[in-house]
Image (cartoon, rainbow, N blue to C red):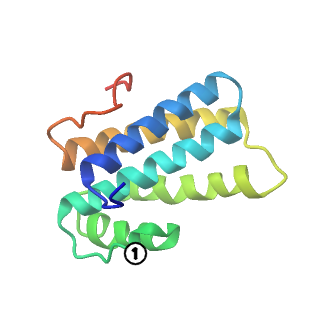
Amino acid sequence: MSGELTPGGLMSKAVRACISARVLLDLGDVDGACNRAYYAMFDAARAALLASGALVQPNMIKTHGGLIAAFGLHLVKDGPISRELGRLLKRAEEIRWVADYTGDSVELNDAREMVGQAERFIEAMRTEFMPVEPKNGDEGMEK
């Protein structure tokens, strides 16, 4: 295992996490679905930042706050990513926090919405930054 982050590797990881989120949602595990949906978006955002060529320190995009800040600064502030998609990433982090660290459970409708938003977010990152479809595990994700 080299440990080197590549846009294609991160995007494949994001797609797999999103597929897992959908499966967990279908099984009724709303908290698990929200966790996987957020990490799908997290990895897709990391892939987008790397693919964009933005001058970002690799350790900065390993933390939640660092990634969200870098994504907003380099890809949302002046484009090409819409503010709406930038807000989805931040909102997903907030919902994941509830799912993972509080005694509360996420409502089923909120989880459904989050999984759908993760699918939309990943597709937007793939379209903008990865015109050639990544291989390795992205089968089954709706386009």
The picture places residue 126, in percent across and down from the top left corner, at: 26, 42
Residue at image coords 48%, 39%: 17
Find disc 1 in the rendering and name its residue.
59
Instruction: Tell me where residue 79 sits by quadrant.
Output: bottom left
Left or right, residue 94 beside residue 84: right
Instruction: Tell me where residue 56 sits by quadrant.
Output: bottom left
Left or right, residue 136 beside residue 66: left
Number of callouts: 1
The three-letter amino acid code for the residue at tag 1 is Asn
Residue at image coords 71%, 32%: 29
Left or right, residue 62 beside residue 79: right
Nearer the observer, 1 or 95: 1
Nearer the observer, 57 or 86: 57
User: Against 105, is 136 above or below?
Assistant: above
Instruction: Tell me where residue 91 sits by quadrant.
Output: bottom right
Residue at image coords 36%, 60%: 3
Q: Residue furthest left?
A: 132
The picture places residue 114, in percent across and down from the top left corner, at: 55, 41
User: Would you call the spot at circle 1 few (<14 residues within 10 Å), some (14-19), or many (20 or more)?
Assistant: few
Q: Residue furthest front?
A: 1
Q: Is residue 82 visible?
A: no
Q: Element type at marker 1?
A: loop
Residue at image coords 29%, 43%: 124
